[in-house]
Image (cartoon, coloured by chain):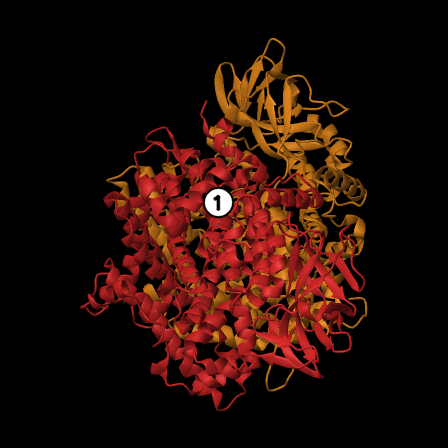
Chain colours: A orange, B red
Amino acid sequence: MTTGIATTADHLRAALDGPWGEIREQARLQLADDKFAGDPYLDYKAARARVLEQMRLISTMGYAERGFRRENGGTSEPGAAVTGLEMLAYADLSLWVKAGVQWGLFGGAVENLGTERHREYIKRLISLDLLGCFAMTESGHGSDVANLETTATYDPDTQEFVIHSPTPSARKDYIGGAAEHARMAAVFAQLVTQGESRGVHCLLVPIRDENGADLPGVTTFDDGLKGGLPGVDNGRIVFDQVRIPRENLLNRYADVEPDGTYTSEIENPSRRFFTTLGTLVRGRVSVGGAAAAGARVALSIAIRYALKRRQFSDPDSGQETVLLDYRSHQRRLLPLVAKSYALAFAQNDLVRRMHLVQTGQDLNPSSQRALEKRAAGLKVAQTRHATRAIQECREACGGAGYLTENRLVTLKADTDVFTTFEGDNVVLTQLVAKELLTAYSDEVRDLDALGWVKFAATMVGDEVRKVTGVRQLIQRLRDSSSDSVDEGDIARRAVQLQLFADREEYLVRTAGHRLRARAEDTTPFEAFNNAQDHILAAGTAHIDRLILEAFIEGIEDIQDQEARELAETVCDLYVYTTLEENRDWYIMHRFMSVERAKAVRRGVNELVDRLRPDALTLVEGMGVPESMLRAAMLDDASVFERG
Amino acid sequence: MTTGIATTADHLRAALDGPWGEIREQARLQLADDKFAGDPYLDYKAARARVLEQMRLISTMGYAERGFRRENGGTSEPGAAVTGLEMLAYADLSLWVKAGVQWGLFGGAVENLGTERHREYIKRLISLDLLGCFAMTESGHGSDVANLETTATYDPDTQEFVIHSPTPSARKDYIGGAAEHARMAAVFAQLVTQGESRGVHCLLVPIRDENGADLPGVTTFDDGLKGGLPGVDNGRIVFDQVRIPRENLLNRYADVEPDGTYTSEIENPSRRFFTTLGTLVRGRVSVGGAAAAGARVALSIAIRYALKRRQFSDPDSGQETVLLDYRSHQRRLLPLVAKSYALAFAQNDLVRRMHLVQTGQDLNPSSQRALEKRAAGLKVAQTRHATRAIQECREACGGAGYLTENRLVTLKADTDVFTTFEGDNVVLTQLVAKELLTAYSDEVRDLDALGWVKFAATMVGDEVRKVTGVRQLIQRLRDSSSDSVDEGDIARRAVQLQLFADREEYLVRTAGHRLRARAEDTTPFEAFNNAQDHILAAGTAHIDRLILEAFIEGIEDIQDQEARELAETVCDLYVYTTLEENRDWYIMHRFMSVERAKAVRRGVNELVDRLRPDALTLVEGMGVPESMLRAAMLDDASVFERG
C-alpha cells in the first residue's frame, strides 16, 4: 500500500475501508506494534494489567476523543470512533472490549444519558483518570432489561438515591471492569420516588475507593476465567443500601426534583425506556464490527495457510496438492470470504447511518429507529458469521489450527460471547422481526413483552414492511427486472435482489398471518411461541436482504475496473451461497424450480473455481495487515516446505 | 439409580450404557471425586502435572489392564477398556487424552505391532513405570501418513536402526507426551534397509533419560498452549541420527534380519501399511466416544439450566417463562439430545463389534475392514456433533455459559480438536465414501492416493454397496415397507429407513457415475476434485443410515414399556431432524414432495413439543451423574430464583 502503484487488492481494501478509511490506515501503522498484541501466556490477572497498560497508551492516541461531543472534550466523530476502535480487534479482542466498555458503554451512558452536570466525568473517563463500568445485566435478567431488580429509591430527606440489590438475582453480573479496575459504575436500576416505580434509569455509583477497595455497601466479586477475553475483568456487584447524591442520576430524559417530584419530557414510560436504550445503539454497532474484524483475521490466516500447505500427491504431477486446490477447501473458506466482504460493506453503511443520526445530520424521526433495527440485525449476522467462520478456519488448519501460537483458537474463544452480549442473537432477531411485523408502529413500544403479538395479528398483511423503504439504486435494479423471477437469469443482480426480497416479504407476511390465525383462540404467548421459528426466519431473511443491498451499493464506489469485476464475482458467491443455504425454502414455496436449485449448487462450484486464482488478492483486500496476523505457522518452513 | 425402583430414566440409562454398563456404573462412583476433575485455574505446566498425578491414581484402578491381552499382563477386554476410559471424559478431557495416548496409542502400538520381545514394555507402560508417546504426525504430513519423512535406516554393521528427521517438515508434531513426560516414543518412519525403502513402520525410540533430559540426537520442543486440553503436554521431536537396537522395530508384520534382509508375511507394501494402521482402530473408536460423552455433559448442563432459568413475563400468567418452554429453545436443544441418543447406541454397537473382532470372536475376514470404515464414520459424526452441540449449549446459556465455572467453554475448547485428531473429518468422510464406491475391493488399497478414483469409475453402478450387508431386524423392517416410499407414512420406521437408504444409495451411485463420466477426459485428481462435494455427501449419508439402524436396534433392547415409547419418540426426532436438514436434497431428487417436506418441519415442532415434559428424564437417561456436571450456575439461586 506504500508502493504508489495501486493493485487490485489496494482498490478492494480502499472500498472495504469505507468512509473512515484514513482512520483505518493510521491504525494499521499504529497498532501493528507487539505491545498491542495479546500475550496468551499471561495468567488472567496479568493479562488484565497488560490490557490496562495498553489502554493508557491508546488513550493518548486520539481513539477515545472521537466518540464524544466537542462540548464534552471530544471531537464529535462517532463514525470515526467506532471505526478506529474496531481496528483494536485486529490487535487483541480483550483490548477492544476493555476500550468498548470504558469509552463506548460507560462513556456513552454518561455522554448520552447525562447532562451538563456530568460533563466533568467525561474528560476524566477519556483520559482514564476515571475508570468505569456499565452495570446493566443482572444474574437474573439479561435479555429482559426492563425487568431488572436493582432499585434506586429517592430519599428527599437527604436528597440521595439509595441503590440496592433486593434479591440474589438482582446481583449485577458479567460486568466488564467490575472485578478489578472500575471505580464507578453506570448502574441501571428501577427508579422509585414518592412511593412509585418509574422504570429503569441509569445512575452513577462510585464503587471503589482510590486504593481499589469496595466502598461501604458495595460488594464486588470476580467472575473469574471465561471462555476467552482473559484481559477483561468481568465481575459482579451487589449493593446494600448504597447512598449517592441526587445529581448522580443521568438526567437527560428524566429527573427527580429535590422534593422527589419526578419529571420527564417523555411521558410514556415504555417510550422513555426505549429512548434510553436507543441512545446506546453504538454498542451493538461496535460488537458486530469487531466480530466481523475477528472473522477477517481468521480467514486471512486460514487462506494464507491453505495457499502454502500441501497434502497428498497428485499421481499425475507427482506434486503434493495445495489445500486451496481442493474443491471442499474452496467451498468451506471462499464463501466465508464472500460473506466477510458483504458484511464489511454493510457495516460501513451502518456506521455511516449512525454517524449521520448521531451528529444531527439526519434528523428524520424514523431514522433512529431504523438504525436500531439495522444495528440489531447486523450484530446478529456478523457475530453468527464470526462464530462459524473462525470455527471453520480452525478446522481447516488441522492440528496447527489448534495451537495457540497460530491465533485461531484465541480468536474463537474471544469472539464466542459476541453472539450473546449487546443482546442475545435469538432475542435480537425477534426484535428485528417484531419491527417488521408491526410496521414500526410506535404503539407497539408501549405494549408489554408479548403485547405486540396481538397488535401484529390485527394488522393487514399489506401494511407490513411498507415503511422499510428502498434506496434508489436498488429500486432501479429491481425495476429493471422485467422478467418474472421464475424465468429470470439468476446471474442477474436484479433477479437476485428479487429472490432475496421475495423470501423476506413472504416470510414476514405469512408470519403475520400465522399470528393472526392463532390470536383468536390462544394466549399471546402461545400464538407467539407457535410461530417463533417462522418469526425468526423472517428476521433473518430481512437481514440477508439488507446485507445484499449494502454489498451492491458498496461495489458502486469501486472505480477500478478489475477490482470492481472481482467484487461482482464475490457478490455473486455471497448470493449463490445464501440461496443454496435456503434452497429448501425457495423450492418449497415455489420461488425456485428444482432445476434452478441445482443450477445454484453448480453456480457455487463455478464461482469458487473462478475466485480461486484471486484468493490472495481477496485476502489482501480484507485489509488485515500481515504484520497483525501473528500466526507462527505462516512463517514456519516445517509446515510448508518439502525436502 | 440406588433407590431400587427403576425409573424411566434408569431404563433409558441402562440401554444407553450398553454392553459394558457395569463398567460405567463403577466409573460413575469412582470418578465423581473432585480429584479427577480439571482445575482451569492451573497454568498449563501445573495442569500437566495434575493430570499425570490423576493418571497414577487411575493406573491402580484397573482401567488400563482391560485394554491388553492376558499374556501381556492385561485382562483382554477391549470393549470394557474403551468404555471405561470414555468415562474419564465426564471428569476431564485432558485426563482422557493423556490416558488415551499412554494406554491406547502408545500401548496399543506396542501391543498390536510388537511381538513377545516387546512384552516387557507393556507391563511397565500399564503401571506408568514407562511413559510413552505416539509419534506419527509430522509438521509436514498429518492426513497423508503414508508419506511421512522420518527415516529409520538399518545399519547391519552395528545391527541398529538410525532414526533421522531429514527435512524441517519431518519434525514430529502435536505429539501428546513429547513436550514433557514421555520417555519413549513409538515412532512411525520410512524403513530403509539394503538401500531400499520399505514404507512406514513403527519403532520404539527412547527420547529422554530418567531425569527428563533429551537423549543424544533427540531434540524435543513444547507446542505450548493450545485451544484447550491444558493438561496434555503436546510437543515436537526432531531426530538427528539417533541409533536404536534392531529389536526396537515393532515386528509383528515385518522384520529385518541381522544382515538387513527385510521379511514380511504381507508382501504388498500398501496392504502392509493398511494392516498396520488397521490394528490402531481403537483410537478412532475412542475419540468418537469421548466427543459424544463431552456433548452429553454439555447438553445435561444446558437443559438443566433451561428447565430452571426464566426470562420475559408471559402477560397472561404474569409469570416469567422457563427457557425450555420457548419453541426456539426446544428446537435448538432437543434435537441434539435425540442425536446424542442415536450416537450412544451407535457407539455401543461399534464398541461391541470392535470387541468381537479384537478378541477373535469375529473371524470374518471382512469384519476388520468394515469396522475401520464404521469407526471412521462414527468418529466424524460424533466429533461433528460435539462441536455443534457444545457450541449451541454455550450460546443457549447466555453470559453464564461463557463463564469457565459453568464448564461449557472448557468442554468446547477441549473437544475442538477432536474433529482433527485421529483423522481429519473431511479426509475420513472421503475414506468412508471411497470404501463404498469401490465396494471394499482389496485392489484399491494397493493404489496410490487417487488411483481409487479410476478404479471406482470402472465399476458398474450396481456393484456399489452390495457388500455392506443389512442386519435382520432392519431387513425385516425394510421388507415390511410394502408401500412405495412416495405414499408411505413418514412416521413409520420402515419408511424412514427407506428414505435414509435411498439417499445413501442414490448418492453413492451417482457419485460413481460422476467419476466415470469424468475419468476419460481428465486426470484422476480433476475427476475426484470435481466430484468431491458429491463424494462427501455420499459418505455422510451412509453414516446417517448406520446411526439410524443402530438406534432402532438399541431400542429393541429396552424392556420397559414407557422407556421404550419415549425412546421411539426420540428416534423419531432424530429422523425428522435429519430429514429436515436434508430436505432440499430429498425434494430436488424427488424422494419427497413439497407437502411431505412441510410435514417434516411440522413434525419436528410436534416432536419437540411432545418431548418437552420429559426433558429431565431424557437428560438423566444420558447418564452423566449430577455430581460430575460441575457447572456452578446449576446451584446458584441468583440465576434462577425470583424475589
Q: Please tell me whether residue B328 is drawn above or below residue B377 in the rendered image.
A: above
Q: Is residue B2 above or below residue B183?
A: above
Counting other residues with Cα less than 10 Å from the Cα at mark 1, is it few (<14), some (14-19), or many (20 or more)? many
Q: Quadrant of residue A308?
A: bottom right
Residue under mark 1: which chain is it in? B
Q: Can residue A203 be spotted in the picture?
A: yes
In the image, residue B586 above or below residue B406: below
Q: Is residue A460 visible?
A: no
Residue B138 in percent (x, y) is at 67, 67
User: Where residue A165 sits in the image (x, y, percent)?
Assistant: 55, 21
Residue B569 shown left or right of residue B129 in the figure: left
Q: Nearer the viewer, residue A549 or B303?
A: B303
Amino acid beneath label 1:
Ala
Residue A108 drawn at (x, y percent): 65, 37
Whole-percent x, y for residue B158 in the image:
77, 74
- Give the residue at x 33% y 45%: B12
Q: Label 1 belongs to which residue?
A: B298
